[in-house]
Image (cartoon, rainbow, N blue to C red):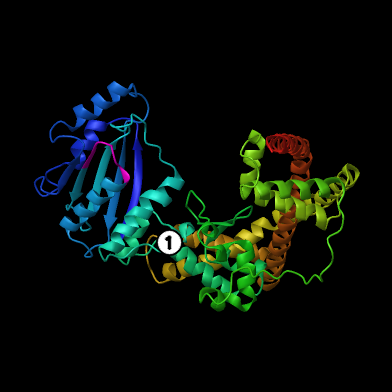
Amino acid sequence: MAVTKILPRNGGLKEAIDYVLNGDKTDGHILTAHFNCDPGREYREMMKTKLETGRLDKRQCYHIIQSFKPGEITPELALEIAKEFVREHLDGFEAVIGTHVDRHHIHSHIVFNSVNADTGEKYHSTQQSYYQQIRAISDRLCREHGLSVIVQGEPARSVSYIEWLRQSRGQPTFRSMLEADLRDAIRDANDLGHFFLLMEHKGYEIHHGGRLGFRLRGQDRFQYPGRRDSLFTEDGIRAAIQGNLEQIEAGLRPVLPARPAYQPYRKHPKHSGFLALYVHYLYLLGKIEKRQYPPRMTPHLRQAVMRFERYQAQFAFLRENDITTPADMAAFEQRTEETLGRLTKQRTLLNVRKKKRQPLYAALTDAEALEPSRALYEEGFTGMEEEFEQYMKAVKLLEDSGIPQEVLKKEKAEVYEQLSEVNRKIRAEREKWKLCREICQQTPAMEQDIQKTEEHQKEVQEHEHRRR
């Protein structure tokens, strides 16, 4: 299995070449190779190419690294795979290869000129080119040589090189520990508010917003596990708490099962206003996508074809809310703004309630999370004085409040659950308002596109008629 990454370099071309071809790392220069450049003249020939094409500024070179699983490959095979990769992906580029064996895992370095010696064009690196070309070619070459590959189709589960390295050694990572704690909390929680309470008692701070973030006390940054696995989004957690975790993990059901409401068959009505415009426009985009219209189009229409699904969603939104005229749109926007105002006020009241109780909530979390530290301090372990002092302060604050801890826990879980629900509703209303704004801004350009396309189609038909 090869973990690949590409590093753009704005300088240090000579240093990068020297590092790749280091004899101490490449078994005395045995595990090296050159493409489109001569040994000992790599730097001069690459700079000559830049000078002849007038491309001396900005990006100087790119550095690709292929790291293999320990014990799975020989140095010679790693070098051969790197050569095949350069032949296929870097045709015309001056490149040097060095397979390094100074670490416990074998890895190949490829440094190549940013300018193609044959075409004079610069290499462009994007996330799309990485997954569709670099990663795809590397994985295919690994399969052809009988090596394992990272599972495709799940780019959201990709991990950093350091994290992959720790996992390959059997060492825990913060991400793996966080996901284990999340799964434990999901299994034990009764609802979403209770889940947040359990995570806080495990010592995590929670960031509520578009994505759920978690970090341990003392950490600088939040981790957002929902980016890698939709199970750990707010909706995924809510669904899993309802008893579906085992089925979700086994792949027997999706994280968020789609359950569209039953709608009996009905004839398509004759639309008017916004709906009629969108029906016509979607029909036009569908014809263009199938190459049934002449290729000459407006720039806006070319972009619109790429956003076909977005226009479909806007049409469904208009139909579901029965919006046909600008007056209907204005009324819907007003209702949405009023709903947003009510929800924002409700969230403010909940936040004020939460802020008033925050010292007690924090003390409740400290008392739960620092209980092991108290036990270690009482057993005589050193270095636990600060944690023990914080624990005693939390216990005293809870006792002075006169509120039983069970009551406080229940209240905290309810507040968190209500805040989560209000935030979800606010996001939904904001999405509706955003759709209204987009539709109002797009309709003039849509009408112009339809008019120009029909005029052009009419000209083509008249021309064909005259030819006959």
Q: How many marks?
A: 1
Residue 169 at what x, y percent from top left?
A: 29, 64
State whether residue 409 is above or below residue 94: below
Can the viewer see residue 128 in this picture? yes
Circle 1 is placed at which residue position? 152
Q: Which residue is situated farthest in the front direction here?
A: 468
| Type of secondary structure dominating the magenta stretch | loop
Give the residue drawn at x 79%, y 40%: 440
Q: What amino acid does circle 1 point to?
A: Gln
Residue 247 at what x, y percent from top left?
A: 56, 78
Region rendered in magenta = 89-96
Q: Answer few, some or many: residues within 10 Å of disc 1's Cα (few below 14, many 20 plus, some between 14 and 19).
A: few
Residue 350 at what x, y percent from top left?
A: 75, 56
The quadrant of the rendering that contains the C terminus is top right
The quadrant of the rendering that contains the N terminus is bottom left
Q: In front: 36, or 209? A: 36
Q: In front: 127, or 226? A: 127
Q: In front: 436, or 244? A: 436
